[in-house]
Image (cartoon, rainbow, N blue to C red):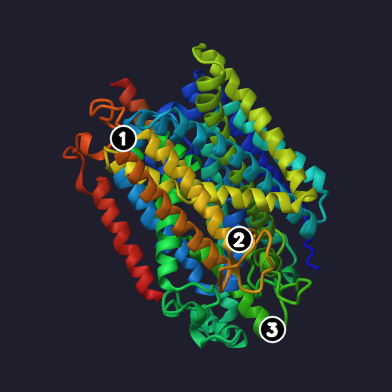
């Protein structure tokens, strides 16, 4: 089993990083005077900082370890999570949706739903979101602690306590600003910590040409065409031609449209970073500026996984094997760190890894304390209190949010199935969300009842679709077919997820329209001004230099991402 | 914002840069077998140092600009 040895210099780097993380919290403490300072950074963050935090908040365990694992398992097709999914969605949220989020002065995504629709739609979104963030943060903590236990031999409990304590202190002191500043530190750490790994790995396999040659061995061994691991689109013609088991329709609609737009356009965890920007223009530029580094991230997070599997196939078993004899893909990134980085830069790489887990956790905690305080506590439990009181509650929510996360982390160690089930339920809740926002923002006729029952139906349809289908080779149970029958077998779990999302989205879309037409509108055009596209005055940016305008940035981003798709076709 | 983020960012990476560069000079060459014989600590330390110092310089320039604007 992989075991890394750290030298004094590695620990020194790690400790220096911790000192800076906590120091930022201490320095920022004196700027937190109101609840808006604590939850929304007083809406004073410049676009470049908000933009880097926008991608960093999402840069948790699932991205660094998960994307490396997917790079090894599926190869270049993993880039669709970025070049087909995240980037177009980030352009869309910046150009079309941010005017309503920022312009409405809503303090959270659920609050936007309350302004646009009604109390029950907000309540549904706020409560599911709050529960979800606590569990995601717990899972992030669990993943970090088990990884450290595995590769460094660190004590599991100590890792949990240490990471929870650090995140707690810096958010408690500096609120969202502290989280955002640290996310930017984490962003640069990931870049500088992983870049040497990628460069050394690429040099070792003989550059891109050497890598594709080695990946041909991987592909042919697995029974696919030679280029299946090094092309993003070429083998999407049919689901059986690629390791992901997805065809281009499932990919474009499921991942590209429903899941990615659903996440990047409606998840408060990321939207909160843009809401903290200091002006409407900067709020819109936040996701657009974030798109530039984001589209290069496959080189940092997917490429190490691809190099790992190429070496695994051609130099006899680099990756540890699981009980069923297949490589343990989740170890791709840690193994690469240990293989190429000598003590010194190894400390930097491990610090980057820890930073990514902690930023994932901190992102969830800051989103949780805001939604809890504004959308649950202030709305349902104790309305009409002073701002001081809500600021106090925000601090308290940070503490118990982290305590709940720790509890969730331990629950994961004990009841793996329960956590899998919860994640499944969250997926069902999230899948239809984008339909609600799309209709809410662009069709003034959408009513509160329509939105609420559309969401419920979408969630239900997701559960039913998942309950009646099964990925190939899986047994009925958590993986699907729990409603008694498997009416359809998908080639892979990924394909099943994508199609679950497509069904849920479509159901929500249709039901929301149908019920909206059958129910009366409760909100007048005046109520909806600033919340719906056709009732909001266009934003005119004549006073901005052309290259600073959101629309210009959007066109540049889309042109670049199209080029990347073509280059790696 | 009241704290220029480039300050802690520049400071942290400058410290990392110095640490790695010095370590790269004094460390035993044998540990670089795994990094294909390249003294990555030295080279990467220099890269980090350049980045850190550049950030500090930007922060300083911005502070000076604010200061001048304050005087005017």
Helix, strand or loop at label 2? It is helix
Residue furthest left as drawn = A542
> Which residue is rendered at x = 79% and y = 60% of the image?
A5
Chain for disc number 3: A
Mark 3 is surrounded, within 10 Å at the Cα level, by few (under 14), some (14 to 19) or many (20 or more) other residues, namely few
Q: Which mark is residue A315?
A: 3
Residue, disc 2: A66
> Which residue is rendered at x = 70% and y = 72% of the image?
B34
> Which residue is rendered at x = 37% and y = 44% of the image?
A512
Compared with A272, A212 (above or below) is below
Q: In which quarter of the image is the N terminus of chain A?
A: bottom right
Residue A353 in percent (x, y) is at: 64, 54
- Tell me: A216 left or right of A519: right
Q: Nearer the viewer, residue A126 or A10?
A: A126
Residue, disc 1: A280
Chain for disc number 1: A
> Which residue is rendered at x = 38% and y = 70% of the image?
A565
Compared with A87, A512 (above or below) is above
Residue A207 in percent (x, y) is at: 52, 79
């Amino acid at each position: 089993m992989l075991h890394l040895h750290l030298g004094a210099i590695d620990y020194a780097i790690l400790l220096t990083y911790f000192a800076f993380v906590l120091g930022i919290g201490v320095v920022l403490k004196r700027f937190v005077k109101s609840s808006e300072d604590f939850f929304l950074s007083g809406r004073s963050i410049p676009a470049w900082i908000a933009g880097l935090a926008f991608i960093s908040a999402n840069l948790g365990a699932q991205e660094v370890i998960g994307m490396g694992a997917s790079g090894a398992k599926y190869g270049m097709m993993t880039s669709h999570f970025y070049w087909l999914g995240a980037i177009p969605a980030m352009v869309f949220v910046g150009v079309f949706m941010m005017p309503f989020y920022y312009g409405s002065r809503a303090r959270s995504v659920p609050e936007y739903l309350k302004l646009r629709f009604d109390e029950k739609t907000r309540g549904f979104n706020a409560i599911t979101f709050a529960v979800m963030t606590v569990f995601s943060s717990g899972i992030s903590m669990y993943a970090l602690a088990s990884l450290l236990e595995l590769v460094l031999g660190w004590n599991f409990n100590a890792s949990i306590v240490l990471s929870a304590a650090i995140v707690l202190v810096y958010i408690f002191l500096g609120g969202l600003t502290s989280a955002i500043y640290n996310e930017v530190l984490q962003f640069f750490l990931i870049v500088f910590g992983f870049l040497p790994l990628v460069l050394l790995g690429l040099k070792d396999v003989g550059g891109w040409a050497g890598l594709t040659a080695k990946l041909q061995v991987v592909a042919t061994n697995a029974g696919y065409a030679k280029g299946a691991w090094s092309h993003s689109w070429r083998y999407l013609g049919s689901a059986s031609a690629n390791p992901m088991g997805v065809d281009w329709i499932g990919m474009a609609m499921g991942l590209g449209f429903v899941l990615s737009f659903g996440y990047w356009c409606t998840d408060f965890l990321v939207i909160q970073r843009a809401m903290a920007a200091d002006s409407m223009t900067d709020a819109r530029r936040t996701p657009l500026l974030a798109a530039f580094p984001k589209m290069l991230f496959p080189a940092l997070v997917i490429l190490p996984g691809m190099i790992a599997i190429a070496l695994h196939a051609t130099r006899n078993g680099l990756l540890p094997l699981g009980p069923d004899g297949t490589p343990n893909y989740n170890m791709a990134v840690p193994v690469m760190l240990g293989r190429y980085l000598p003590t010194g830069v190894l400390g930097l790489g491990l610090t980057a890894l820890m930073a990514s887990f902690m930023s994932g956790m901190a992102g969830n905690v800051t989103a949780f304390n805001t939604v809890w305080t504004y959308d649950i506590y202030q709305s349902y439990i104790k309305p009409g209190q002073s701002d001081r009181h809500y600021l106090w509650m925000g601090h308290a929510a940070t503490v118990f949010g982290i305590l709940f996360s720790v509890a969730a982390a331990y629950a994961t160690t004990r009841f793996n199935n329960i956590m899998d089930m919860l994640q499944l339920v969250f997926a069902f809740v999230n899948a239809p969300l984008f339909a609600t926002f799309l209709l809410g923002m662009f069709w003034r006729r959408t009513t509160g009842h329509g939105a609420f029952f559309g969401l419920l139906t979408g969630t239900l349809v997701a559960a039913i679709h998942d309950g009646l289908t099964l990925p190939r080779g899986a047994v009925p149970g958590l993986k699907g077919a729990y409603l008694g029958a498997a009416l359809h077998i998908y080639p892979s779990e990924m394909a099943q997820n994508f199609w679950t999302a497509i069904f849920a989205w479509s159901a929500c879309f249709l039901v929301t329209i149908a019920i909206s037409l059958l129910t009366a509108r409760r909100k007048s055009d005046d109520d909806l001004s600033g919340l719906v596209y056709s009732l909001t005055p266009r934003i005119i940016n004549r006073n901005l230099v052309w290259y600073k305008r959101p629309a210009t940035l959007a066109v540049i981003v889309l042109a670049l991402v199209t080029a990347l798709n073509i280059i790696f076709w | 914002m009241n704290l220029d983020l480039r300050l802690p960012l520049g400071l942290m990476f400058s410290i990392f840069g110095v640490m790695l560069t010095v370590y790269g000079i004094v460390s035993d060459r044998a540990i670089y077998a795994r990094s294909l014989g390249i003294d990555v600590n030295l080279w990467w330390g220099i890269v980090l140092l350049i980045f850190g110092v550049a950030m500090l310089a930007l922060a300083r320039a911005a502070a000076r600009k604010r200061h001048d604007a304050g005087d005017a």
